[in-house]
Image (cartoon, helix red, strand yellow):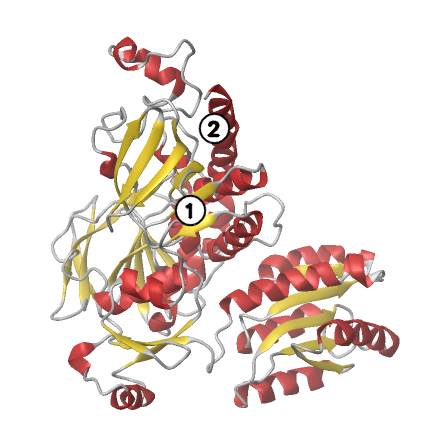
């Protein structure tokens, strides 16, 4: 196994030796350690490692060096290893330059010298960054492989599922990678059977369903207990937060997710306004941290698992899954969030997964390298996707019906988009059709003011337009508003039929639905604040009232 590199650069030989000693003593079992006092030598090494197909996990660089500033070196290194984590060593007087470099070179952390004791000031920072890097690192010999057609909806679904569940995989395009045919020969299969999934142990699946793939990669799909204190349906930020607080407070907690833990948030390329992360973090990273945390507290997670129906019996909740199994619980938290609305134009459905994608920019980013792509929508998620895709695509076009992006997105994102050379914002514009033969080949744009139409060539259209609540599966179980959001708490008392369905001597708790002991949390709840931070707060709040309800039983 080829170990990834940690590279350190500092022209002060005493400082360099000190940090090299600390890093080597702590990480030499898992990483190769390289140190140099020359910025030029460091860049030469970085280029050499790229040619050798080696990986660089972390670069630690001093800011003030005679050949070039550390920020400049990191900017050059970023062109070769953009995924490598970057730490800038600074003196107190260099803090302003370090903060500026957070945006300029996507700096991950700046570390004040001296960093001793290393156990308190150095290792926790490095451990966190290396964990983030490892979550996305896909070594050639240890990852599941997917062999298929790039523009196949089936291939896209498998990639999205593995990515959403933080399972490393390597994508191999049958039409462009000569290695692909070798896998087909070894598996004694043909192109008509694609996609082909080759697991780490050498076993393989041809055109697998999501459940089969989940089982093959070791995801839990069956509950192990007869009764749970709380069943949480939906593993977005609200559901994950509820699971963390439920388990850490000693409740027997089961979390069910039908596809990808993290929800819509997991597809966000970069979240920059989440408290406590000044350099931002990806949605996938936030999901990974939350999943690791809740599993450590003892939560069981079933995925992929989909709920078919919920019934109550003597106050207990019986949840029937699509596979026919049942889960018994004392309470339920519904945290199924919202889903992107479909783009209702000719051709959009035909090319879904074959050039038209809903909130999947991070999954298909590498397929868009040096391409001209289009993003429909002007909200924060669309802007985050555009910023991420700008690293890969030749040109990113954001399509909005409004006069300005500032009408729909956060100011910091508007500024970032405006400063990115290869992002264009097409105002007062809408997409009216998608066309092509087997895959998307072009789209037609229309100026909403003048009515002028234009057809442009593109292989990729990402959709980030509006949302709808993920509560249709509940049918008439709980009371919802006309848009499908679940009505809870005091809002239930406004219903004319309130006294016909609510028979307890107390009022409904804030997140409680029309059925006592069933709660709603996050974006699916009527009146809930939107945003990841709000959803996390909603999830923790739901558990507070779950405990109150359990005390009544």
The disc at residue 63 is: none
312 is higher (above) or lower (below) than 364? above
Q: Which residue lies furthest to the front in this view?
A: 226
- The residue to which callout 1 is attached is 380
Query: Disc 1 versus disc 2: distance between alpha carbons?
Result: 32 Å
Please name the residue shown 18% across and 77% down the image. Answer: 193
- The residue to which callout 2 is attached is 546
| Left or right of residue 458: residue 108 | right
**On-image quarter of the N terminus:** bottom right
- Can residue 458 be seen from the camera position used here? no
Nearer to me, 340 or 375: 340
Nearer to me, 405 or 317: 317
Quadrant in the rendering for residue 82: bottom right
Residue 384 position in % (x across, y down): 44, 53
Nearer to me, 394 or 403: 394
189 is higher (above) or lower (below) than 434? below
Name the secondary structure under disc 1. helix
| Left or right of residue 158: residue 79 | right
């Amino acid at each position: 196994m080829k170990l990834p590199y940690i590279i350190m650069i500092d022209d002060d030989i005493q400082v360099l030796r000190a940090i090299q000693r600390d890093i080597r003593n702590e990480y030499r079992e898992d990483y190769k350690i390289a140190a140099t006092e020359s910025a030029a030598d460091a860049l030469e090494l970085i280029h050499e490692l790229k040619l050798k197909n080696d990986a660089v996990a972390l670069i630690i660089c001093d800011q003030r060096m005679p050949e070039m500033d550390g920020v400049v070196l990191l900017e050059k290194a970023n062109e070769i290893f953009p995924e490598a984590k970057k730490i800038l060593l600074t003196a107190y007087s260099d803090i302003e330059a370090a903060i500026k470099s957070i945006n300029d070179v996507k700096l991950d952390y700046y570390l004040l010298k001296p960093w001793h004791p290393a156990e308190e000031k150095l290792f926790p920072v490095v451990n966190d960054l290396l964990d983030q890097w490892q979550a996305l690192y896909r070594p050639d010999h240890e990852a599941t492989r997917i062999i298929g057609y790039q523009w196949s909806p089936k291939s896209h679904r498998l990639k999205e599922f593995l990515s959403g569940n933080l399972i490393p995989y390597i994508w191999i395009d049958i039409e462009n990678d000569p290695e692909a045919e070798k896998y087909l020969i070894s598996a004694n299969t043909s192109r008509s059977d694609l996609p082909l999934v080759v697991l780490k142990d050498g076993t393989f699946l041809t055109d697998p369903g999501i459940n089969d793939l989940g089982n093959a990669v070791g995801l839990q799909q069956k509950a192990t207990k007869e009764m749970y204190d709380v069943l949480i349906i939906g593993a977005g930020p609200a559901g994950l937060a509820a699971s963390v607080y439920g388990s850490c407070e000693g409740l027997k907690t089961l979390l069910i997710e039908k596809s990808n833990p993290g929800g819509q948030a997991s597809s966000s390329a970069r979240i920059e306004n989440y408290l406590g992360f000044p350099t931002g973090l990806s949605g996938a990273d936030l999901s990974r941290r939350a999943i690791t945390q809740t599993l450590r507290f003892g939560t069981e997670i079933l995925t992929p698992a989909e709920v078919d129906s919920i019934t109550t019996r003597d106050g207990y909740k019986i949840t029937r899954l699509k596979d026919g199994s049942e889960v018994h619980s004392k309470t339920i938290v519904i945290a199924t969030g919202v889903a992107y609305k479909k783009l209702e134009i000719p051709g959009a459905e035909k090319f879904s997964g074959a050039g038209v994608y809903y909130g999947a920019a991070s999954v298909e980013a590498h397929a868009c390298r040096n391409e001209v792509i289009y993003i429909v929508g002007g909200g924060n998620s669309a802007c985050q996707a555009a910023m991420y895709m700008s690293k890969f695509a030749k040109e990113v076009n954001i399509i909005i019906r409004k006069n300005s992006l500032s009408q729909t997105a956060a100011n910091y994102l508007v500024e970032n988009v405006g400063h990115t050379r290869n992002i264009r914002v097409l105002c007062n514009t809408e997409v009216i059709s998608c066309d092509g033969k087997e895959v998307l080949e072009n789209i037609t744009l229309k100026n909403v003011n003048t009515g002028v139409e234009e057809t442009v060539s593109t292989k990729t259209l990402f959709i980030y337009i509006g949302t709808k609540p993920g509560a249709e599966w509940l049918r008439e179980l709980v009371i919802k508003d006309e848009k499908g959001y679940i009505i809870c708490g005091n809002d239930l008392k406004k219903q004319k039929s309130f006294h016909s369905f609510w028979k307890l001597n107390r009022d409904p708790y804030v997140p409680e639905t029309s059925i006592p002991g069933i709660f709603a949390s996050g974006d699916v709840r009527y009146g809930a604040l939107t945003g990841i931070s709000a959803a996390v707060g909603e999830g923790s709040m739901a558990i507070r009232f779950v405990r109150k309800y359990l005390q009544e039983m």
